[in-house]
Image (cartoon, grey):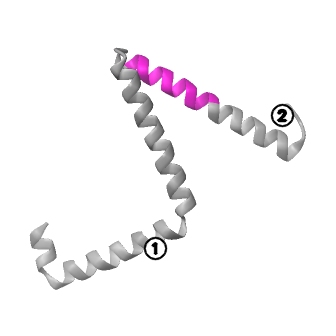
Amino acid sequence: MVRWFSSDFGAFLSIILGAFVAVVVFTWMHLFATCLVLISAGALARLDIQISGWKNWRAFAVLASICLTGVGLGGGIEFLLKTGRLVLS
């Protein structure tokens, strides 16, 4: 890492890449914040489940089922709001 920053090209490329990442983060702050909140909530839930003594696979199954239920309900509600129908036909 030190060798990369010691050359002019490496330092220049690092500054340009860092500036690009900063612009993307600030431009899409709402998306970045939403993803950060979702990742943090998932990590905290997994930590709480593991501290309570559950095995890894059981913790994964609980979190996956809760997440998939939320995705399914969200997709169903969005479909209902956009089309006004309850079922696909």
In the displayed structure, 63 sits above or below 80; it is: above
Circle 1 is placed at which residue position? 23
Determine whether, in the image, residue 32 is placed left or right of residue 69: left
Residue furthest bottom in the image: 8
Sooner in the amino-acid sequence: mark 2 or mark 1: 1
Q: Residues within 10 Å of mark 2 (few under 14, many from 20)?
A: few
SS class of the residue under badge 2?
loop
Q: Which mark is residue 88?
A: 2
Q: Residue at x 59, y 30 (%)?
A: 68
Q: Residue at x 76, y 42 (%)?
A: 78
Residue 37 is covered by the magenta coloring: no
**In the rendered picture of this protein, how many numbered marks are placed on residues?**
2
The front one of 44 and 61 is 44
Residue 87 screen position, x and y as percent = 85, 31
State which quarter of the image contains the N terminus: bottom left
Residue 33 screen position, x and y as percent = 51, 55
Dominant secondary structure, magenta: helix
* Residues drawn in magenta: 57-69
Determine whether, in the image, residue 83 is placed left or right of residue 62: right
Give the CA distance from mark 2 to mark 1. 41 Å
